[in-house]
Image (spheres, rainbow, N blue to C red):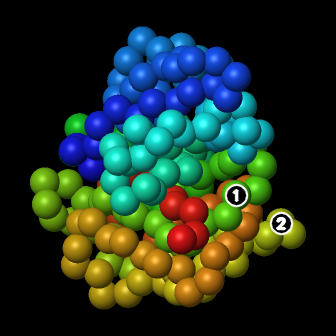
Amino acid sequence: MNQLKSVYLRRKDTPLVASGLIFSQTDKQRQINRLGRGWLVLCLACGLFQFSSASRASVQGNRLDLAKYQEVITDSTNGVQTAGYITDGFVDDDSCWVSGNSGAHWAEVVFPFPVAVGSAQLAMGQKGSSPMTVFQFEYLTNGSWVTVPGGAVSGNTNVERNIIFSSAVTASAFRVYDLLDSPIRIRQMALYPPN
């Protein structure tokens, strides 16, 4: 993800408004982030902003991480490694969430409205080791957590994992749930719309 360049957004009725709004830390981005979580996704969904054609080449495979900068809720925190690191856009050992030392662990990404998700990317562990071995992606429906079709993983040894769901799911909350490993470290969780 480090090779991602700036993405340019243009207001439909005006010239270019901001550069680096999504994938680089700029003053404009920090101003947008201060407006509240979910603001950018809401603006994109409502059609206030659109991607300029020049920006499409700078988004890796035209994939937009829906989870980036969204609210994250976790079961626990170990020290200063808080939940906000999970969707901050940085895949780094110093920028990760660390769970408590016992029990089942989960990290939930909350959206301001339902979004369609077709795949997930998870960067976990630390210094190239200690990935989650058995986990599943779940979505919230009618007050209950349900495993995403194709979202269960067992016997994992990789610190980075792409999970393509068997079918897309639309929900306002998604989480990764681990019953076995403790503590767990998540450096980044990305959720992508269906292709």
From this view, report whether residue 181 is shown above or below residue 37. Answer: below
Compare residues 98 and 50 and report the one nearer the observer: 50
Taking the image as shown, residue 187 lies to the left or right of residue 168, namely left
Q: Position of residue 148 (x, y in %)?
A: 61, 79
**Residue 20 in sight:** yes
Tell me which residue sits at (13%, 54%) in the image: 127
Question: Could you say which quadrant of the image residue 153 lies in?
Answer: bottom left
Which amino acid does the dot numbered 2 rest on?
Answer: Gly
Taking the image as shown, residue 148 lies to the left or right of residue 81, namely right
How many dots with numbers?
2
Tell me which residue sits at (23%, 38%) in the image: 94
**Residue 75 in sight:** no
Question: Could you say which quadrant of the image residue 11 lies in?
Answer: top right
The residue carrying pointer 2 sits among few (fewer than 14), some (14 to 19) or many (20 or more) residues within 10 Å by Cα, namely few
Question: Would you name the residue on which mark 1 appears?
Answer: 115
Given contact means CB atoms under 8 Å apart, are the residues at marks 1 and 2 in contact?
Answer: no
Which amino acid does the dot numbered 1 rest on?
Answer: Val
